[in-house]
Image (spheres, rainbow, N blue to C red):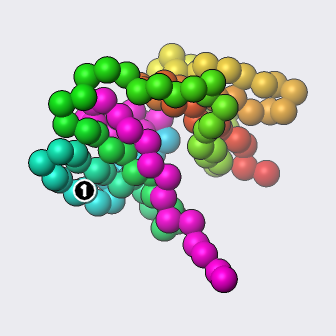
């Protein structure tokens, strides 16, 4: 059997804030949206691959999501790692750096960690 990666879903409290964060921090753009009485889903894309980040906002939810020990994360490869690091420093969203491995993590508005890796 053969399968293909399609998307990863994360739940967010403020959809517009999250869309703005992913656009500014990682250059992701809204590719598709689905509105329902109980939720709104926005698929964000990088413009290069078919893979999507699915942002789901459950309407009426106000309490933060339980993210566990934050061992789960999504990784992004940065074309210009130094420029990405500078932007993320300015945004104040770097939450962990591992200079030995040459990577760092940023945190989105809902507390999800995103790994930033230099292009190799």
Write down the residue under mark 1.
33
The secondary structure type at the circle numbered 1 is strand
Residue span colored magenta: 1-25
**Percent of width and height locating residue 96:** 67, 20
Of 110 and 39, the residue lying toward us: 39
Of 101 and 91, the residue lying toward us: 101
Please tell me whether residue 31 is drawn above or below residue 63 in the rendered image: below
- For disc 1, the neighbor class at 10 Å (few under 14, some 14 to 19, many from 20) is few
Q: Residue furthest right?
A: 100
Of 23 and 43, the residue lying toward us: 43
* Residue 5, magenta (yes or no): yes
Residue 70 falls in image quadrant: top right
**Percent of width and height locating residue 120:** 79, 51
* Image-based side of 52 in relation to 75, left or right: left
* Image-based side of 57 in relation to 59, left or right: right
Please tell me whether residue 15 is drawn above or below residue 99 in the rendered image: below
**Percent of width and height locating residue 74:** 59, 43
Q: Residue furthest bottom?
A: 1
Question: Which residue is located at x 33 percent, y 39 percent?
Answer: 19
């Amino acid at each position: 059997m053969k399968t293909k990666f399609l998307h990863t879903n994360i739940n967010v409290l403020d959809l517009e804030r999250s869309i703005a964060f992913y656009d500014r921090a990682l250059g992701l753009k809204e590719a598709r949206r689905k509105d329902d009485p109980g939720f709104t889903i926005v698929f964000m894309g990088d413009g290069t691959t078919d893979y999507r980040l699915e942002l789901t906002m459950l309407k009426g939810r106000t309490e933060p999501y339980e993210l566990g020990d934050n061992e789960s994360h999504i990784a992004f490869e940065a074309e210009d790692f130094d420029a990405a690091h500078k932007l993320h420093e300015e945004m104040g969203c770097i939450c962990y750096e591992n200079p030995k491995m040459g990577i760092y993590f940023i945190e989105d508005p809902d507390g999800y960690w995103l790994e930033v890796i230099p292009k190799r």
